[in-house]
Amino acid sequence: MATVPKPFAITVNWNRAEDTVQCVSSLIQGNPGVEVLVVDNGSEDGSVEVLRSKFPELLILENTENMGYVKGVNQGIRRALLEGATHLLIINNDAVSRPKMVADLMDVLDRYPSAGIVGPKIFYYGTDMIWFNGGHFNHWMGFSTHQYMDSRDDGRNRERKVDFITGCAMMVKADVFSEVGFFDDDFVIYAEDLDLCLRAKEKNYESWLVPFAMAEHKVSLSTGIAGSNLMTPFRAYYYGRNMLMMIYKRKRGLQFITCFLGQTLVMMPYYFLLMGLQRTQGSFRHYMKGYNEAMRWVVSRER
């Protein structure tokens, strides 16, 4: 007997009740049949009370402190799996689902048995400018890009395989988490989505972009400046840290060497130039702090 699909949407909230209410509303109103689970990371702005008043039936996991994004979302995944979830939509609380997004994502997972992770086309909030339309990872240079970022929507709506799906909005088959494992806690935030997609690929699960499924992203509300891609000190620290850690975890031999050089000789100068042009105070120092921490982390480990 075929399993009846039971999709769960999981989002993590920390002191952003208004955004989380909008995210949850978009899921409940535009995507019938999806269960929504909110992990609250010790908010002090009354988020839980606001959410309970707006959505009395909403499943909320309350933490007494901020566990960090990855630990929070993993907590939500574990609970959703216990509740019998067959499909898990991981979505940022500053993202808004357009109608039918969940059904469209599930449809592609059903039609392509090799697909394990799928994601929608994502626009900057309130615009027709693309923030995400598929992720590319250079396996020899060790850096990732959002394809078509900052371009206007061209209307092409054919699903296709990609290297990775952004964690801003990704749907994952329950079997993937069972076989591959959850998001890696070491990353805290950023690169955990790329790492999961690469681990899934090693187990023959493909990542697919579903452009006729759509969402909007307010971008950097909790980690930077709303609506921008500025290299703030917070973002710079994890950009300097996490990609080196991911490369160590996922690459061996010659590819490890070329990816390490790519991060050091290509991406570091690129980010330094970007931070200089953006004049984001403190970002240089925080990038190097993250980079040096990753180097110490790599040296301290044995293969």
Image: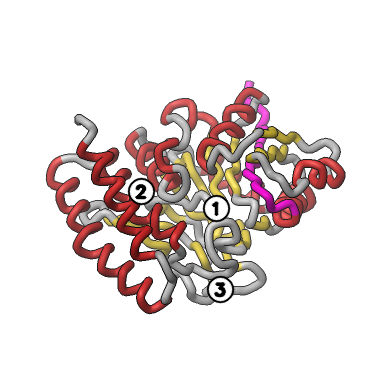
For residue 6, the mark is: none
Secondary-structure class at tag 2: helix
Q: Look at the picture and state if 71 lies above or below 129.
A: above
Q: Which is more N-terminal, label 1 or label 2?
A: 1
In the image shown, does 81 or 244 lie closer to the viewer? 244
Residue 10, magenta (yes or no):
yes
Amino acid tagged 2: Asn
Residue 108 % position (x, y): 55, 47
Q: What element carries label 3?
A: loop
In the rendered structure, which disc, 3 or 2, sits on the residue that comes first in sequence?
3
Q: What stretch is highlighted in magenta?
A: 1-17
Mark 1 to mark 3 CA distance (whole Å)? 16 Å
Amino acid at dot 3: Met
Tag 1 secondary structure: loop
Task: Give yes or no for contact between labels 2 and 1 (Cβ–Cβ under 8 Å).
Answer: no
User: What amino acid is found at the position of numbered circle 1 in the picture?
Assistant: Cys
Point out the residue furthest to the bottom here.
277
Work out whether mark 1 precedes mark 3 in sequence or the reverse, and give the earlier one. Answer: 3
Residue shown at the point (53%, 55%) measured from the top left? 210
Q: Which mark is residue 129?
A: 3
Residue shown at 38% from the left, 79% from the top: 277
Other-residue count near label 1 (Cα within 10 Å), few / some / many at <14 / 14–19 / ≥20? many
Q: What residue is shown with label 2?
A: 242
Q: Where is residue 136 in the image (x, y as percent from the top left)?
A: 36, 58
